[in-house]
Image (cartoon, helix red, strand yellow):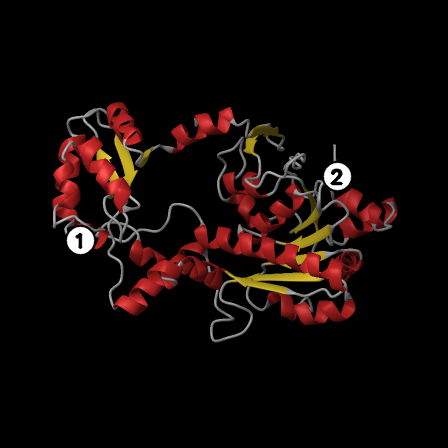
């Protein structure tokens, strides 16, 4: 089997929660050695979010496979010495500590770059390391609110957050791509740039379309539940058997086919009320009544068949359980078994498939599982490791 692209790259991460662990897990998937520095005893606080997966947190087992867990109190002199030894041999350092904490600890990007010129430093924060909100704490839902995402989701009567941690995931993915870019530049030029990502700015990028729409039209897209705010018909409809089917009209060709094949009324395609997308959006309620009446006469399977015949994109409104058992995941052999301290779990392969390469899918570590092996690799013998434990440094 070919070596993975990041084999030989060592990542040291002072990480917690979601954003940084998500970034470093992607690096581990590609073969990087990721040393996860955790608090002695409790470890990453995300370990305690829930006990749903064999007594472990669903967040933690998702984000932390293929990593080595080193417990370390970096505020003790001995613990700090261990960290400095790690950094001296590392290619990448990632941190998402509380605002200002890295700087107070002497672990800011500028300071580390002076001590270790070849290291790529990645800082993940809520609102950036500078600016008026640099010292403000930020969590996923708070950032969803500050960026306006929550004002766009939900029903007309009540806003709602996205059901997954989109600010954290966005920041983690930009950190991952930023680190890869910095490693590439280091390889080609010898210069190691630092990378800074904030949750707010990561999710701001995702707000591009509604932000432009609002700034230049003078009107914010309406909050319309699971429907599309600026395209119609595009959303969920209830079938006669109680199932929900979502359809998406993307262009006028599809609209004509939808009217002819699904609605059974070709004249609607040229009806002045609905002849273009902006007209359909303006008369959304009237149009939805027509579409809903047709769905009410069809079971979900029959509705899907007609939509397929019309070449109109559609989907079932699945539950999480139905997604977990989705035929695409099993049919494409996307599941692998991964061991955890509580027992084996199913894990999905990374979404980017590199031809001829199998991603790394190793165990989720217990707290401090690799402390002794990491320390031995740094030159500590058994006596020195025992002394570190006695001092509470590891």
Given residues 222 and 320, the one toward you in this image is 222
> In terms of secondary structure, where does tag 2 sit?
loop
Mark 2 or mark 1, earlier in chain = 2
Residue tagged 1: 279
Residue name at image x 57 percent, y 35 percent: 349
Write down the residue under mark 2: 3
Q: Picture coordinates of residue 56 (x, y %)? A: 54, 36
Which residue appears at 83% of the width and 47% of the height? 377
Residue 1 lies, in percent from the top left, at: 74, 32
Does 47 appear above or below 218?
A: above
Residue name at image x 15 percent, y 45 percent: 270
Does residue 26 appear to the left or right of 87 in the view shown? left
In the displayed structure, does residue 275 sit left or right of residue 244?
A: left
Please identify the residue farthest to the bottom as the structure is shown.
132
Residue 344 at x, y percent in the picture:
59, 27
Which SS class for mark 1? helix
Whether residue 325 is visible here, answered yes or no, is no
> Relative to 232, is 261 above or below?
above
Q: Residue at x 50, y 75 (%)?
A: 131
Answer with left or right where residue 191 lies relative to residue 336: right
């Amino acid at each position: 089997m070919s070596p993975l692209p990041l084999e030989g790259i060592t990542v040291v991460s002072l990480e917690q929660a979601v954003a940084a662990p998500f970034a470093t897990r992607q690096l581990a998937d590609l073969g990087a050695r990721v040393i996860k520095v955790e608090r002695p005893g409790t470890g990453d606080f995300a370990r305690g979010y829930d006990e749903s997966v064999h007594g472990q947190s669903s967040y933690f087992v998702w984000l932390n496979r293929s990593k080595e867990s080193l417990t370390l109190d970096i505020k003790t002199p001995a613990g700090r010495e261990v960290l400095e030894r790690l950094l001296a041999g590392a290619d990448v350092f990632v941190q998402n500590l509380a605002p200002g904490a890295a700087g107070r600890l002497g672990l800011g990007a500028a300071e580390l770059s002076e001590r270790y010129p070849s290291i790529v430093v990645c800082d993940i924060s809520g609102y950036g390391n500078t600016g008026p909100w640099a010292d403000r704490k930020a969590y996923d839902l708070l950032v969803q609110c500050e960026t306006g995402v929550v004002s766009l989701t939900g029903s007309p009567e009540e806003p709602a957050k996205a059901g997954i941690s989109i600010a954290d995931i966005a920041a983690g993915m930009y950190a991952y791509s930023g680190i890869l870019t910095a490693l590439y530049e280091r390889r080609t030029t010898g210069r190691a740039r630092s990378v800074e990502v904030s949750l707010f700015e990561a999710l701001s990028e995702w707000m591009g379309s509604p932000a432009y729409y609002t700034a230049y039209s003078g009107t914010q897209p309406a909050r319309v539940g699971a429907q599309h705010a600026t395209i119609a018909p595009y959303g969920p409809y209830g079938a006669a058997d109680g199932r929900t089917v979502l359809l998406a009209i993307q262009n006028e060709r599809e609209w004509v086919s939808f009217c002819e094949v699904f609605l059974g009324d070709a004249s609607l395609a040229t009806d002045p009320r609905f002849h273009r997308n902006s007209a359909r959006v303006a008369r959304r309620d009237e149009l939805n009544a027509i579409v809903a009446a047709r769905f009410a006469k069809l079971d979900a399977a029959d509705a899907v068949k007609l939509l397929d015949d019309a070449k109109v994109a559609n989907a079932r409104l699945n539950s999480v359980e139905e997604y977990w058992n989705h035929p695409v995941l099993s049919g494409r052999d996307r599941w692998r078994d991964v061991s955890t301290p509580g027992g084996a779990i199913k894990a999905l392969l990374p979404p980017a498939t590199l031809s001829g390469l199998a991603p790394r899918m190793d165990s989720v570590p217990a707290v401090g599982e690799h402390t002794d092996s990491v320390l031995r690799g740094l030159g500590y013998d058994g006596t020195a490791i025992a002394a570190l434990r006695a001092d509470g440094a590891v």
